[in-house]
Image (cartoon, rainbow, N blue to C red):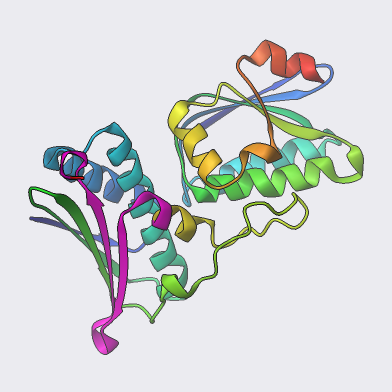
Amino acid sequence: MRTLIIPARFDQLDAIRRFAVQAAADAGLDEKGLCAVEMAVDEACSNIIEHAYRGISNGQIECTCESDATSFTVILRDRGRPFDILQVPEPDLKASLKKRKVGGLGIYLMRQLMDVVRYENLGDMGNVLTLIKYLKSAE
Amino acid sequence: MEIKMQRYKHCDLLAIKGKVDSYTAPELSDAIEKINNDGRFKIVIDMAELEYMSSAGFRALLVGQRNCKRYNRGEIVLARVPKKIMEALELTGFTPLFKIFDDVTAAVGYF
């Protein structure tokens, strides 16, 4: 298990992606799995910064990565306002260019790329988002 | 992220290098807007050296495409899209919104 704590700012996204991808590589995820983790962690953190910490400049995100024989797990914790991404409606991926909405894409991607996405609101203790990717060999 | 712009007679070429995420996507939007502000709406985006693009980048492309296609005045087309970025574009249903070319010459020649 390893943990990284970063300021909740967009300029930190590269650092948190690198951290999670390295942990995923060490856990034995294949190239496709690494791409999935890279994107899912980015989209999750972008949402935390944009929504949970909207108007809050000194927030932090705690990223913990752990793995076992069958899965790789990323746990993202923040102390921002409740933001249940699972309540965000799925975007219409067949809408015409004119009607295509710009929101909700990141969350959709995250859910497509990971095997499990779980959200918990801990009240004053903030939000916990858990992302799990199963190891291919275990499927 | 780095963006190189090159002006052709019938279109503009934007070559993106590096990573486009929530931090850098505004630069991509600015680059597209800058071309639009010159009254030009036919744009080729060369992605050969693009390492990563999140949904923030897709949104920049979507907004740009909408603006370029308005009044049938132009269009954004993509060239040399890396495999992993193509997969994400497919997953989000973006591939029908953009013409995609295997090489830059064909993309520029399209206009």
Q: Position of residue B5 (x, y in %)?
A: 65, 25
Q: Is A94 left, or right, of B26 in this rendering?
A: right
Q: Position of residue A123 (x, y in %)?
A: 28, 88
Q: Is A58 left, or right, of A112 in this rendering?
A: left
Magenta residue check for B33: no
Q: Is residue B45 above or below residue A29?
A: above
Q: Is residue A39 above or below residue A31?
A: below
Q: Quadrant of residue A130?
A: bottom left
Q: Quadrant of residue A36?
A: top left
Q: Is A87 left, or right, of B3 in this rendering?
A: left
The span shown in magenta is: A111-138
Please identify the residue farthest to the front as the structure is shown: A139
Q: Position of residue A48 (x, y in %)?
A: 39, 67
Q: Quadrant of residue A128?
A: bottom left
Question: Residue at point 62% right, 53% down?
Answer: A93
Number of numbered discs on residues: 0
Is A61 in front, or is A102? Answer: A102
Question: Residue at point 69% right, 56% down?
Answer: A100
Question: Residue at point 16% right, 44% down?
Answer: A138
